[in-house]
Image (cartoon, coloured by chain):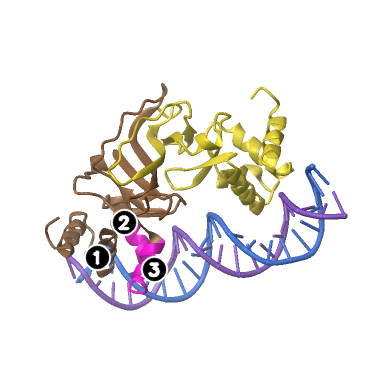
Chain colours: A brown, B yellow, C blue, D purple
Amino acid sequence: MTQLPHLRFEKILRENKLKVTQPRLQVLAMVAEKKAAISQPELEKKLGSSIDRVTLYRALSAFEEKGILHKIFDLQGTATYALCSNSCTHQHHHDQHLHFLCERCNNVFCLDEFVLPQINLPAGYTLNSVHVHAIGLCPSCS
Amino acid sequence: MTQLPHLRFEKILRENKLKVTQPRLQVLAMVAEKKAAISQPELEKKLGSSIDRVTLYRALSAFEEKGILHKIFDLQGTATYALCSNSCTHQHHHDQHLHFLCERCNNVFCLDEFVLPQINLPAGYTLNSVHVHAIGLCPSCS
DNA sequence: TTAAGTGCAAAATCTTTGCAAATGT
DNA sequence: ACATTTGCAAAGATTTTGCACTTAA
């Protein structure tokens, strides 16, 4: 967290046996830069023609597969991506997630530090993880 | 609930100022028939060529707009649709929702009757509604 | 050196739009 | 009779695939 971003991303890529390439570093930097989760179209717009659309798709799926990013669907059903926090181990990754979806600006915020409540299910269901989407207005839009 | 399905759907359509047409009745019947939420591709497959793909899209968006169906995104991000329960007023519709997403069969189950827990948010956020996605194995897959 | 990753072109999906014909009230 | 809805064709958007060239290790 305190190291230079560039080195941090290199480390993440190496740890996941992915080659360190310009496109991947650019995508990670752009995802990290925004406080909220970012969608493929938004990334594409911001990256302009510096990397190919297909490369972006492939980078995002590789990152998702490795658990570097996690994918959240916003209110319109568009996939958005956010860096998994440091505390987000592979275990934890599939566990608790609290996301806030703003109805006005449509941003998705990950509130990892907030603990989720217990969920009770009918008999017969096996529970593996819980995703909570809180919907309303974010601080900027309130 | 006790009336004939066909009449029930006619009533729903009339109440929402939508004309009672064959395509709409077919879609509603098919959604009601399945216990889990159903996706557009699945509906399209089941309906075969009896109604046009475009008509299906339009029916689904009309129903969603009127609050007749609600839309849930499954684990792959595909939109699925389920009938709002009778107790699902326009108010309530935007409130509490507990959905179970099965990792194995990928079905989405609405567990409307289960009460959602209280969610605590950081200062600055205005909460309007909460969607909980419980993920695991449904009774058939457990 | 060589396996992995990139970019381009093209295919495959998925979703929307325009408009004339058909249908419900 | 008239506004709504449908079906078709076509456009637009999104995502995936194949393959030759490039690049990181």
On what subunit does the disc labeled 1 rest? Answer: A
Q: Is residue B103 visible?
A: no
SS assignment at label 3: helix
Q: Main secondary structure of the magenta part?
A: helix
Q: Residue B51: where, in percent of width, then height?
A: 69, 48
Q: Which residues are magenta?
A: A41-62
Whether C12 is drawn above or below B12: the answer is: below
> How far apart are the two marked residues, 2 and 3, measured between alpha carbons?
20 Å
Residue A50 part of the magenta-drawn span: yes
Please name which of the two marks, 1 or 2, marks the residue nearer to the observer: 1
Q: Position of residue B82 (x, y in %)?
A: 55, 37
Task: Give the residue at mark 1.
Answer: A25
Q: Is residue A14 magenta?
A: no
Question: Splitting the image into 4 quarters, where does residue A18 fall?
Answer: bottom left
Badge 2: chain ID: A
Q: Are marks 1 and 3 on the same chain?
A: yes
Q: Residues under labels 1 and 2: Cα distance?
A: 13 Å
Q: Disc 1 residue type?
A: Leu
Q: Position of residue B63 (x, y in %)?
A: 61, 43
Q: Is residue A110 visible?
A: yes
The residue closer to the viewer here, A17 or A96, is A96
The residue that mark 2 highlights is A62
Give a yes or no on whether discs 2 and 3 share a subunit. Answer: yes
Note whether A53 is above or below B83 in the view shown.
below
Name the residue at 66% across, 40% down: B16
**Distance in Å between CA atoms under marks 1 and 3:** 17 Å
Q: Quarter-wise, where is residue C4 in the image?
A: bottom left
Mark closer to the chain start, 2 or 3: 3
Write down the quadrant of residue C19 in the picture: bottom right
Number of residue marks: 3
Other residues around mark 1 within 10 Å, as few (<14) / some (14–19) / many (≥20):
some
How many residues crowd around disc 2 within 10 Å: few (fewer than 14), some, or many (20 or more)?
some
